[in-house]
Image (cartoon, rainbow, N blue to C red):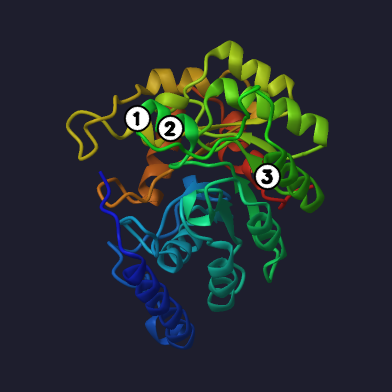
Amino acid sequence: MEKNISRRDFIKNSAFAGGALILSSAMVNAAGTMFGMSEKGNYGYDRLLKGVCDIHLHCRPDSRERSVDEYGFMKGALTAGYRAVMFKSNDFSCHDRAYLIRQALPGAECFGSFCMNRVHGDRVNVFAAQKAVETSGGLCRCIWMPTLDAAYQYRYEGRKEKGIPVLGDNGQVLPEVVKVMEICAEADIIFATGHSSPEESLSLLRKAQEVGVKRVVVTHANSYIWTMTTNQIKQCIDLGAYIEYCYLPCLWGEGTKMPQYQRQSIEDFVSFVRIDPTRSFISTDLGQAVMPHPIEGMRDCIVKLQSAGVSQSDIDLLVRRNPAWLIGLDK
C-alpha cells in the first residue's frame, strides 16, 4: 500500500512545488517540452484523449506517495489533449494549488476538491467547507464526504476508533452534513458521497434532493467495499445522482503492487458503465506510486471500452461531457 508522509515533509514538498511553479513559468519557453519535476516521461498529443476530463486523481504534494505532481500532470494532460482535471487529496486542499497552476499554465482548466477527513476534525467540518468554496478563484468544484476516515470504512476495517459519521444513530443525515449540502447547492458544485456505504449513500442522496443540490456524485460505485448493485445504482440515478466508475479496480489485484484487492474484469467494468451512460462518468482514481501514470490509465480505459463495443457517443458522455458538466464547464 502507500507510505504515509509526515506533515513536515508535506509542508516542505508543498513549498518546493510552489517554488517550482514560479520557476517553471519563467522557464517554460526555454524548456519547451519540460514535463515538470521528477516525471516519468513526456506525453504527446493523443487524439483518443482529446477533450477528456478526469475529475478524480491523486498527485503530489500529498500525505501519501504519488506517481506525479499536480503541475507536471496538468502540463502533460494539456499536451495530450485533455480538456480539464479536478485533483483530489484525501487530507489536504488542492483547489488553492489549482489557482497557482493556472498562473503557470495559461488556459489550463485545472480544479481542486476538498475531502471531509480527520485532518479537518472528527466531524464533518462546515466551516472548512465554507472556506473551501470561498477560496480565491472559486476552483473548489467538489466537496467529498469522509473517505479514508469514513465511519463505514473504519467499521469494515475493524478499527477500534470511530470514523467520521454522515448519519446519526437514528439513521438520519447529520445536521452538519446537511449544512455542507446547502453550501454545495448555493455554490453549485458537486456534493460527493465519499467512502459512505451504498445504504448511507442512498440516504445522503434523498436528503441532497430535498436540499436542492444539482450536482451530486455517488463515488466508487464499482469499487471494493463501495460497490453497488444494479438496483441501487438505478435508485441513485432516480434520486438525481451521477454515478462514478473508477478504472483503478481494473488495474490492481494479483500480479500487481496492490495485490490485496480483487481485480475487476473489463467485462464487469463495461457492464457497470452501460447501466446508464447518460448519468455516469469514468475517472481513473490513479496517481498511486505503484500504479500506472493517470494519463496511461485513461488511455488504456478508452481503448478497452472501444474494444468492448461501447459506442463513441457513450464514451464521450463518460469521459468528456458528463464530467465537464459536473465541474461547471458546460451549462
**Mark 3 vs mark 1: in front:** 1
- Marks 2/1: CA–CA distance: 6 Å
Task: Please tell me whether residue 74 is drawn above or below residue 252 in the rendered image.
Answer: below
- Marks 3/2: CA–CA distance: 22 Å
**Mark 3 vs mark 2: in front:** 2
Which label was assigned to residue 157? 1
Which of the image's four quarters has the N terminus?
top left
Q: For the residue marked with disc 1, what is the amino acid? A: Glu
Q: Secondary structure at mark 3?
A: strand
Residue 266 image-quadrant placement: top left
Is 39 left or right of 130, judged from the image as shown? left
Task: Please tell me whether residue 319 is drawn above or below residue 64 in the rendered image.
Answer: above
Q: For the residue marked with disc 3, what is the amino acid? A: Ile
Which residue sits at x=40%, y=51%?
295
Task: Give the mark nearest the N terminus, 3 or 1.
Answer: 1
Mark 1 and mark 2 in contact (Cβ < 8 Å)?
yes
What residue sits right under mark 2 in the picture?
153
What residue sits right under mark 3 in the picture?
190
Which residue sits at x=65%, y=60%?
132
Q: Nearer the viewer, residue 279 or 29?
A: 279
Which label was assigned to residue 7? none
Whether residue 84 appears in this view of the structure is no
Q: For the residue marked with disc 2, what is the amino acid? A: Gln
How crowded pointer 3 is (Cα within 10 Å; few <14, some 14-19, many 20+) is rated as many
